[in-house]
Amino acid sequence: MIERAERAEFSQVEVNRGLPAQQLVHYFERVGAHWRLAPRLRRNISFQRMNLTAPLPALPPFDVIFLRNVLIYFDVETKRSALRNVGRLLRGDGWLFLGAAETTIGVDDNYERVVAGRTSAYRLKSAVPAGIAGKG
Amino acid sequence: MSVHAIVIDDSRAMRLILGRILGQIGFDVFEAADGRAALDLLAGLPQVPALALIDWNMPNMNGLEFVAAARDDARLREMTLVMVTTESEQSQIVRALAAGAHEYVIKPFTSDAMVEKLALLGLVPSGVSL
């Protein structure tokens, strides 16, 4: 899966979904029957294998973390542990995006849910010691 | 008040498919089999449609020529132009956008993908579930 993500290739059907044509031709290049993310963007992306339930390696804090359709597979204790670990990598003013069927509510009180249009995201409540979220 | 769209494609089957999708999200749909026929039809309509879905390869006047003609016509300036075509080279998408197309959908597409594109353009009325 990581190898596939690193290739950054998408089928025609995939890029037809919700991506404006202007952005498609600006950020992707045609490779055979597929579309591949432009090299200038691929260079800014790195991939690492991690265990969400174990202490995560030292990384600089992130402005945005997408953790979509992962928590649904875990029991509450494991979800709590993963959210705590992820929270340590999120900047104090950063955003966490979960899948549509996932929430921090009732699992980890350190997050607050913010509705934006048809979606929602989570940010750390100020109760989280700034030293943890801001370290990096 | 009803919202109008025009589907310009030389394939009757494709006009039917696109017409059905547009009908489901509340459009009244006109049809034309090529760019020239579309311009003639539009000239006679009291109200310019909000949206045109345009095939590329058609006899008489192709989709790219239609887009250029529509952009040159002050009366048609408010119409949103979406190319719907099998032409999938990057350079062709760039050409169509440069000529004045607002969006580009490559065939084959799913009904959901088409509605999502139209939603991006603000052409799906609220209340229609995606």
Image (spheres, helix red, strand yellow):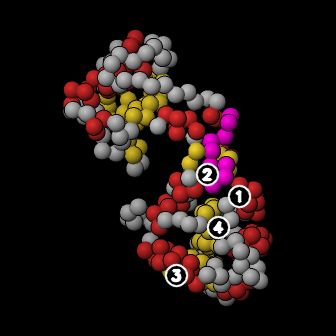
Q: Give the camera-side residue of A60 and B59.
A: B59
Parent chain of label 2: A
Residue A34, which numbered label? 2
The image shows residue A104 at horizontal and vertical percentages of 28, 33
Magenta stretch: includes residue B38: no
Q: Residues within 10 Å of mark 2 (few under 14, many from 20)?
A: some
Check disc 4 and report its element: helix, strand or loop: loop
Q: What's drawn in magenta, residue-wise?
A: A31-40
Q: Give the camera-side residue of A48 and A89.
A: A48
Q: Residues within 10 Å of mark 3 (few under 14, many from 20)?
A: some
The quadrant in which residue B95 appears is: bottom right
Residue hosting label 3: B16
Residue hosting label 1: B89
Nearest-to-viewer mark from 4 and 3: 4
Can residue A54 be seen here? Answer: yes
Parent chain of label 1: B
Check disc 1 and report its element: helix, strand or loop: loop
Nearest-to-viewer mark from 1 and 2: 2
